[in-house]
Image: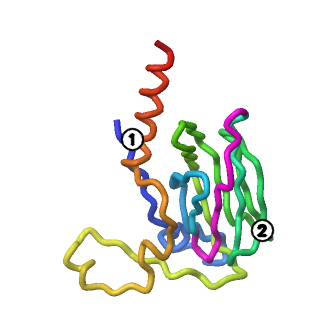
Amino acid sequence: MIIVVNAEPLLINEALGMDLDEDTVLINGTGIFLTTGDSWDFYQDYSLNVISVNQDQKKVWVKLLHDDELLQDDILSEGEFFVYSKSSEILNITVDTIYISPGGELITFKPVYQYLDDDYPEPEIEETTDDPVQEEGQNSSITPSSTRADGFTIFQALACISALVLCRVVINK
């Protein structure tokens, strides 16, 4: 079974016609995959960096930056939360799984939530449509490469997981 994770931001308040004084959800429960040394760029110039993984204790060291300035760092195990708040919650990230192999580490974070930080300008969020002709004709100031750092694609993640399972089966025989 393949699970597809929708990484599109969802503006709950706008969709429901709610007052924009309420917290606006920019990322609503998506999953992300990172390896040691990778980072993920969020809206409003926030980024999450995976610094290292302690393979013996199966823990990951992460840092949260805003415009390359350190805001918070933490060492987390599977199932633990990384929460960044100011006057209200801005990011809520759960470490789902830490995969360790001889070739490196893969960390999955899900669910991931980002809420609007009122101290910074509201991001321009590209609307998506199902009409490829209409999409080709649109010019956008945000491209996928400008909003996300390179990380694992879902196919690469599944290949890594398959390789880990295969290695484990061979070792256990």
Residue 71's disc number? 2
Which residue is painted at 61% across and 64% down in the image?
Answer: 114
Q: CA gap, disc 2 to disc 1? A: 33 Å
SS for tag 2? strand
Q: Residue furthest left?
A: 133
- Callout 2 environment at 10 Å: few (<14), some (14 to 19), or many (20+)? few
Residue span colored magenta: 42-56
Residue 68's disc number? none
Q: Is residue 160 above or below residue 21?
A: above
Q: Residue furthest front?
A: 102
Q: Is residue 45 magenta?
A: yes
Please state if 151 lies on the left or on the right of 38 as rendered: left
- Callout 1 environment at 10 Å: few (<14), some (14 to 19), or many (20+)? few
Which residue is painted at 42% across and 34% down in the image?
Answer: 163
Q: Nearer the viewer, mark 2 or mark 1?
A: 1
Q: Is residue 148 magenta?
A: no
In the picture of the structure, the residue carrying the numbered disc 1 is 159
- Given residues 60 and 136, the one toward you in this image is 60
